[in-house]
Image (cartoon, coloured by chain):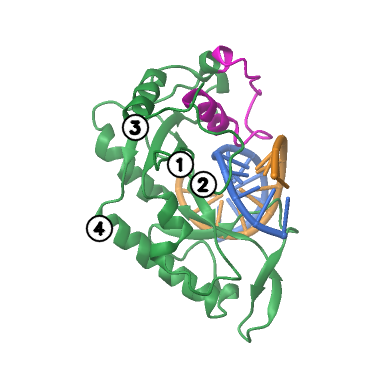
Chain colours: A green, B blue, C orange
Amino acid sequence: MTTPQSESQLLHRAHQLAGLRLAEVATEYNIQMPTDLKRHKGWVGMLLETALGAEAGSKAQQDFAALGIELKTIPVNQHGYPLETTFVSLAPLSQNSGVVWQNSHVRYKLQKVLWIPVEGERQIALSDRRIGSPILWQPSAEQEARLAQDWEELMDLIVLGGLHKINARIGEVLQLRPKGANSKALTMGYDHNGQAIKTLPLGFYLRKSFTAEILQKFCSTSTL
DNA sequence: AGCTGATCATCT
DNA sequence: AGATGATCAGCT
C-alpha cells in the first residue's frame, strides 16, 4: 500500500477497514498471522500500518510525517473501553536540559492521532477480532493542559533527582512505566546527588481513562 | 542501547 | 478484576 497523500485519503482507507476481521486484512496483504499476541505484541499495530500505508519499521517520527499524523491501534472490550494503556514515547532520563512541554516528544506524538480501536479480548481468537471505526483526534486545550501538567510533574522528578520516587501511580492522565527489553536493560540517569546511575528506561503511557474519553466522545453510536 | 510496535502476567 | 511492573519482537 502506498502512503496516503492526504488526510482525507488516509481517513477513507481507515474507514474501509472498519468492520473487517484481522484475518481478512492479513490475507489481503499476505501477512502471516500468529496464534496469539504473547510473542507478537506489536502485530496488530504493524498490520494496520501496512494496510494504511505507513512507513514500516519507522523512526522517531510520526507514522504519517507528511500529514503530521500518528497512528495508534488500541485494544478495546465489547463496550469500546480500552483494555491497555497507550505507549507514547520514551522519557529522556538524561540529556534532558532544555526540554520543555512545548518541544517534548509527548506533545509532538500527540498533536494529531488516528486511533483505530480493535477488539482485544483474549477470548476472541486473534483472527476473528474486528477493526473499529477510526477516530482522528487532536487534544483539546483542556486535554493538553492536563497532559502538560502531568508531563511537568513527571519530568521534574526525573530532572531533580527523583527517579527513585517514580512509579505508575503518579499522573492523572499520563504515567511513567518501564519500557525496555526486560528489567536488566538499563539506561543512564541521575540520582538525588546528581550522580550518574544505571536505571530502568521509562516510557510515557496514556491511562485508559484518558483514552476512553477520546474514544467515547465519537463512539456513542458505533465504533465497533 | 534505543527506537518502533505494544501486551503480558503478577500482584494487590 | 484492574493496575503496575515486566516483557516480546524487529530494526538500526
- Which label's residue is closer to the chain start, 2 or 4? 2
The answer to whether tags 2 and 3 share a subunit is yes
Q: Which residues are magenta?
A: A26-52
Answer whether labels 2 and 1 touch (C-beta < 8 Å).
yes
User: What amino acid is labelled 3 in the image?
Assistant: Glu
Front residue of this view, candidates A176 and A61: A61
The residue at 68%/69% (across/down) is A188
Q: What residue appears at the point 63 percent right and 80 percent down from the top-left corner?
A: A191
Crowd rating for badge 4 (residues with CA inside 10 Å; few <14, some 14–19, many 20+): few
Q: Is residue A15 visible?
A: yes
Percent across and percent down for residue A111 are 37, 50
Are there few (<14), some (14-19), or many (20+) residues within 10 Å of tag 3? some
Q: Amino acid at mark 1?
A: Ala
Q: Which residue is mark 4?
A: A142
Residues at discs 2 and 3 in contact (Cβ within 8 Å):
no
Disc number for residue A40: none
Q: Nearer the viewer, mark 4 or mark 1?
A: 1
Q: Is residue A163 above or below residue A144?
A: below
Please rate how many residues cluster around mark 1, counting C-alpha atoms within 10 Å: few if below 14, some from 14 to 19, many from 20. few
Residue at (49, 22) in percent of width and height: A129
| Residue that carries the numbered disc 2 in the rendered image | A61
**Mark 3: which secondary structure?**
helix
Examine the image and state in which quarter residue A223 appears. Answer: top left
Are both tags, 2 and 1, on one chain? yes
Q: CA distance from mark 4 to mark 1?
A: 25 Å
Residue density around tag 2, few if under 14, some if 14–19, many if 20 or more, within 10 Å: some
In screen coordinates, is A147 left or right of A142? Answer: right
Residue to which mark 3 is pinned: A7
Q: Which mark is nearer the camera, 3 or 4?
A: 3
The chain under label 4 reads A
**Amino acid type for the residue under numbered disc 2:** Gln
Q: Which residue is mark 1?
A: A65
